[in-house]
Image (tube, rainbow, N blue to C red):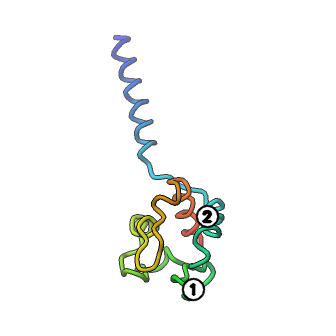
Amino acid sequence: MKKIKYLTILSLVAGAVSAQAQAPAKGDPKKGKTTFDQQCSLCHDATTTEQKMGPGLKGLFKRPKLATNGKPINDANVLDKINNGGNTMTPFKDLLSDSEKADLMAYLKTI
């Protein structure tokens, strides 16, 4: 009986840890701003919607569609654009770590 309780508890703990590992990273908007300033601000402006080299990103997550490809604005499509670039945008898939991308996404949601 003790063995069954022990295995049940162990199974529940393992399931909780697994669920946490699969949960998307929240990201830190402050760190994301630093990443944006270092990696994105040359081509994108966070304070306006005006075109720089790339589109201005103010209010990005309040818009219905991405300016560059018309896809709906959601985490998956924005992250895909960051990872794969397109048109004249450099792909950042191998240039930014997963945590930097999570931080950047958190920051983009604040502008």
Rendered residue at 60%/57% (across/down): 28
Query: Closer to the camera, 74 or 11?
Result: 74
Residue 102 is labelled as none
Task: Tell me: 73 left or right of 4.
Answer: right
**Disc nearer the start of the sequence (2/1):** 2
Query: Closer to the camera, 91 or 78?
Result: 91
Task: Tell me: 17 left or right of 4.
Answer: right
Residue 35 is labelled as 2
Q: Is residue 4 above or below residue 76?
A: above
Rendered residue at 61%/75% (across/down): 41
Q: Which amino acid does label 1 sit on?
A: Lys
Q: Which residue lies furthest to the bottom in this view?
A: 50
Image quarter hosting the N terminus: top left
Q: How would you rate the neighbour count of disc 2 (Cα within 10 Å): few for under 14, some for 14-19, many for 20 or more?
A: some
- Disc 1 secondary structure class: loop
Image quarter hosting the C terminus: bottom right
- Identify the residue under disc 1: 52
Query: Closer to the camera, 45 or 95?
Result: 95
- Number of numbered discs present? 2
User: Residue 60 location, x and y as percent?
Assistant: 51, 76
User: Residue 84, located in which quarter of the rendered image?
Assistant: bottom left
User: Residue 19, located in which quarter of the rendered image?
Assistant: top left
Rendered residue at 50%/52% (across/down): 25
Q: Are marks 2 and 1 in contact (CB under 8 Å)?
A: no
Q: What residue type is labelled 2?
A: Thr
Q: Is residue 14 above or below residue 87?
A: above
- Disc 2 secondary structure class: helix
Query: Closer to the camera, 88 or 60?
Result: 88
Rendered residue at 65%/70% (across/down): 37
